Image (spheres, coloured by chain):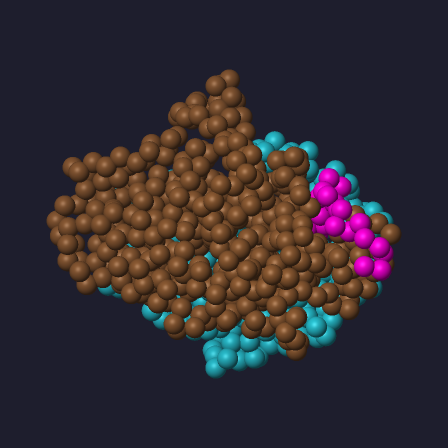
Chain colours: A brown, B cyan
Amino acid sequence: MRLTATYEQRVATARLLHRFNFGPRPGQYADLLKRGLDATQTTVLEHGLADPGLDSVAAPNLPDLGQIPTSGTAAATAFWDAISQGNTELVMWWLDRMVVSHYPLAERMTWFWHGHWATAVSKVTYPLPMLKQNNTLRRYALANFKDMARVMVVDGALNYWLDNEENYISSPNENLARELMELMTLGVNKFTQDDVTAAARALTGYSVNLPTGAVAFDAQQHYADPLRVLGTRATLDAQSLALLIVSKDQNAKFITDRMWFRFVSGTTSPPPTLVSSFEHRNIFSLASALVHSSAWTDPANSLVKSPVEWFVGACRALRVRPSTLKANDIQWQLTQMGQLPFNPPNVGGWPYGQAWLSGVAFQYRFEVASQLVTSGDLSPLSVPKSKMVQACADWLGVPEWSRRTASALAAATADPAEMATVALLSPEYVVSA
Amino acid sequence: MNCEFDRRRFLQWTGAGAFAAVSAQLSLETLTSVASATPLPASTPILVVVTLYGGNDGLNTVVPYSDPTYQSIRSNIALSSSQLLPISDSLAFNSSMPQINTLYGQNKVAIVQGVSYPNPSLSHFSSMAIWQSASLSADTTSGWIGRWLDIQPHSPFNAIGIGSTLPPMMVGEKSVASMVDVGGIQLPWGSVATLLPRLGLSSSSDVPLEAAAATSVTDLYSTAKLLGPLLTKSPTGSFLNEQLSIVATLINANVPTRVWEVNLSSFDTHVGEQADQNALLAEVDAAVGAFMTSISAGSRSNDVTVMIYSEFGRRVMSNAGLGTDHGTAAPVFLIGNTVKGGLYGEQPPLESLDVNGNLQVTTDFRDVYGGLLHDVLATPVGDVIPSWSTALSVH
């Protein structure tokens, strides 16, 4: 595809909105096309401002549900009902936030970090520790990665998920130590088995109260002798271990690569200079450098929207608040598409790219789209029929329809709901090309 | 940690049980008429790949029970004699696997011992990438079945996975496998439905991912046309059983598919291993047993080979949490009515571990793939695994 100046701006603007802001709100794409790329870059980076959208979403009220009652009792029935209700509330609360936020960068980054520190309620069971972790990820989403790592390494849900409450001096459990270095801070093959063994010892002495996610430290159970990790010898606890690891240059390279992988492309590599923006581990600085990079006009940097990103984008465009939909339906469909928030398939987080492009995913995207067009606001398509196809592209933030999709849309001008359905399922909307 | 969020638990969790499809019996006429247009030619070999995600503990699956080190080095998780089904003086199946044990007694199970690759990675993700790509290089992005698809005449039916997200194994340079959901195929409905197949047309302006999205639409309609009528019966049983019962139904209906993929997660038993692993192995055993019964009763009885593998085995020494950390070599199972059952390769000795306390590798997994490519998929090994030529045949 030859990129004309106008087309190039349409591509870059669409990419920035879809990848950093969960897609445009109605009218936003056309508005930013008029205001230019600089304005778009500034807009998608806005955060920390009073947000009437987020203010309208009530925080979940999750009580301490206590230990699991003996099965078969009435207490057990009530307990599992409360777990189920709390988990549903948690998922719908977060989806609502993603959809209604006026400045979605913070939610989008929280979503990135959720996949990065991937912890699943399928094992953790309780919604409360998941909520606490989510709030931690949000608090540090655009702050300093050193602080995020220092707090996350003693996060209750993460410690339980990676078996750290079973990590003893006499018999270490390496799960948290290994994944902390491999998946969260350094990357594979950037440490040795000896580093894992030593790091596991630094992580001894922590226990989790699972119902609340509270983590306690018992110095008696902690390995107190000096340890050698990544070439440095020191007495270490979880937090000083995290800071030691994050201080390594490889950490800057790794986080830069991960951000590129999820926001820009799963197949191209970041320019070598990008890592300097993360020298001080300032996450906003890295996000800003990405937004201002030249990546957005390179045709190679296409990305498949994950199921949640696709769903949230569609809800933002159609002004549908997820909690107004049937929660069971939405959770079922997202699960069948392979991506329910708070339930990554494993500690590596979710797949990317072509993995999301199965016929089965199309089948479930149709189910979702047909619900959204029934309850959503289709007024952006209330234009003369001859202008509907272009209006649809401007509404959803699609740079240009292919001939294939344009012809299918042109056949749907009689019914805005049909046109919206076709558009939401089109390759141009499913992929951020 | 590889905690799988299974469908049963989801239904329980959200109270969404009403989604279960209404069961309907399939008549033999329906089966034969649907596959009659393009049936798989008689006697064509078929491969069913079962991936166990998380790293299955091989030493508690095929147990070197007579080696005293087995009891001493993992005393808190070692299986007792009542939990064993001996198959030789030195090895026994975990007693959670009675049906596979019976199949072994009928010489239908090949156990390839000590399987991994040089310098095994203890990372779930690196190791699974190596197994699924059949390459030790992190630069290889295609899967081994995907590369086999690349050299077949294009058809959405050549290889089918059960689920919604494509596993890396099934993605080639040019072709990808189709997926079928355990819930069956539900094509779009309503007046808009007539427009949607158009989204599967290719367009010169597509970037590769858009082209792949378009292809997936066409593949959904193709698979629905051929497979949809066969999948009206809602599968039951465990998650793996649901997947394998769909595969058995479709194989017995002669659909033109050479490779099937199913999977089960949660084998990452860092804590409380015995209870968890025994339950998982029992699920595998029940699902594979039912699958073989179903296949043996049909016309494809002698065509099917099942391969069961995991990304690695686990640490020989157990931890205080009654579990095991990441390890290396483990057995691979090859099951089928024409498989020459028995033990292949060498059991890695417990007395000679690597520096991390893990088993030595005695068989390269690419030899196992080589045998399957040669014997089942009738494809030269080097066409799928570049510069690899050796093969371990169990047929």
Q: Position of residue B163 (x, y in %)?
A: 62, 52
Front residue (pair B136, A312): A312
Quadrant hosting residue A386? bottom right
Query: Which quarter of the rendering shows the C terminus of chain B?
Result: bottom right
Residue located at (49% from left, 32% from top): A59
Question: Which residues are drawn in magenta?
Answer: A358-387
Which residue is most to the front? A35
Residue A24 located left or right of residue B284? right
User: On the picture, is A22 further left or further right than A418?
Assistant: left
Q: Residue at x 27, y 52 (%)?
A: A242
Work out which residue is located at the far right of the displayed protein and give it: A414
Residue B238 vs B343, above or below: the answer is above
The percent position of residue A225, horizontal first and vertical second, equals 12, 49
Measured as percent of width and height from the top left, residue A185 is found at 34, 57
Nearest the viewer among A215 and A95 is A95
Q: Is residue A55 magenta?
A: no
Residue A119 appears in the rendering: no
**Magenta span contains residue A386:** yes
* Viewer-side residue, B178 vs B288: B178
The structure residue drawn at horizontal position 20% and vertical position 36%, both measured from the top left corner, is A218
Give the answer, above or below, for where A84 lies relative to B69.
Answer: above
Looking at the image, the residue that sits furthest to the top is A74
At 43% from the left and 73% from the top, the residue drawn is: A271
Left or right, residue A433 beside residue A282: right
Question: Count the marks: how many?
Answer: 0
Main SS, magenta residues: helix
Residue A218 at least partly seen: yes
* Residue nearest the viewer, comparing A165 with B70: A165
A412 left or right, relative to B73: right
Q: Residue furthest left?
A: A225
